[in-house]
Image (cartoon, helix red, strand yellow):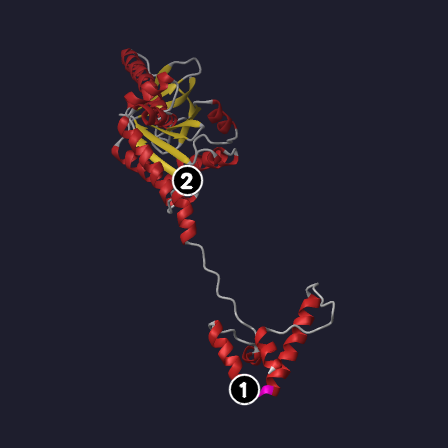
Amino acid sequence: MKKGIIMEMDDFFLTLLTPEGEFLRAKRLKQSYSIGEEITFYPVEGKNQLRYLSSIKKVAKMKTVWAAAAAVLLFSGSFIPMYQNNKAYAYMSIDVNPSIELGINKKMQVVELTGYNPEGKKIISHLDDWEKQDVTKVTEEILSEIGKEGYFKTNKHVIISTVPTSQMEKKEEQKLETDIKEITKAVSEQQLAYTVLSGTEKDLETAHEKGVTAGKYKAVNNPVAKEKVENNWKKYKNHSNPTEPEAKAPPGQLKKQMEENVTQEPPAVDNTPQAAVDQSPVEDNIPPGQAKKMDDNQQKQNPGQAKKQAIQQGSQGNSQGNSQGNPNPKGKYHYSDNQIKQRNK
């Protein structure tokens, strides 16, 4: 009698594995059995046992092969997705002064991050936990760090380029385009200019050979891309400064414009009371002969009044002379010729 574990069973026989590693056959008795159960049994003897053992060994070998194949399939099933998640199927670059390139997998997650100048490497060193993060999130963090470092003060134009590889499917390319739109929206919200360029794998390879990103390579070496960058920058400046600066006129023309634009001073307002205006004497430009005739007529009409006026005028003359530093040493009145004639009559 031997002891073994039931490996197989049919209507008539049991196949058991002994502690010695032997596969033996035993008759199935009228009782319940289960696979994996350890029992004691009497092996079946004879040629049938040998033939059966031979077939059992072949089945065991086939089971080993199938188990190995299953293990390979299982490993492949877990390895292939992992390989796809770690492989870059598209590349996107950001160029301001820092030049940074992002490798993106099919899930639009960043799996590679490379700085192509010292400024770019400095920005990357400030980023934490970027691997396997969404490309839009990582890009926003990069733009934020560029702003903190002050690079937008000297350059407000962001050049973004995309290079899908031949292994990327159409649906992934469409997803990448959607992400680029979100990124450009974030750039616009920061009041920055931007240009989006697309390249080929050949452009990417050439750019890497020159030690630059695909975006910078195309912006410098491709005429169409270069013109696009310049036009977008002009549009941004015109939008930021809609009024053109006033042209500087030549010196002579500028002087003439200033003379024409001088505002005339308003006429002085006469604040003299009306009574004072009415009482102030008004000198008439009367010819000498006519003035003499008028004096004679006045004397004829009222000789006493004329004499009185002459005396008053003489007094006024003396007082004016004294006030002007020309006093009359004799203290006498000065009369005009007409007044003297009238007085002698």
Q: In which quarter of the image is the N terminus?
A: top left
Would residue 253 be seen by someone viewing this image from the given angle?
yes
Residue 310, horizontal then vertical, whole percent:
62, 79
**Nearer to the camera, 64 or 28:** 64
Q: Position of residue 210 (x, y in %)?
A: 37, 17
Q: Is residue 256 left or right of residue 342?
A: left
Query: What secondary structure is the stretch in magenta mostly built from?
Result: helix
Residue in front for this viewpoint, 164 or 279: 279
For label 1, the residue is: 300
Q: Which residue is drawn at 69% across and 64% down?
A: 326
Query: Mark 1: few, some, or many residues within 10 Å (few <14, many ≥20)?
Result: few
Q: From the image, state whether disc 1 or disc 2 is nearer to you.
A: 1
Tell me the kind of residue under disc 2: Leu
Residue sitting nearer the eye, 117 or 125: 117
Residue type highlighted by circle 1: Lys
Q: In this view, does 323 lie above or below 207?
A: below
Q: Is mark 2 on a helix, strand or loop?
A: loop
Return the residue at label 2.
192
**In front: 163, or 4?**
163
Q: Which mark is residue 49?
A: none
Q: In which quarter of the image is residue 336?
A: bottom right
Q: Which residue lies furthest to the front in this view?
A: 345
Of pointers 1 and 2, the one earlier in the residue sequence: 2
Indicate the position of residue 32 as horizontal and vertical percent values. Answer: 37, 32
| Apparent side of residue 309 relative to residue 56 in the rendered image (left or right) | right
- Looking at the rendering, the stretch of residues picked out in magenta corresponds to 299-303
Give percent across and percent down for residue 248.
40, 42
Is 156 positioned to the left or the right of 170 in the image? right
Magenta span includes 256? no
- Residue 186 visible, this angle: no
Say if the magenta span includes residue 301: yes
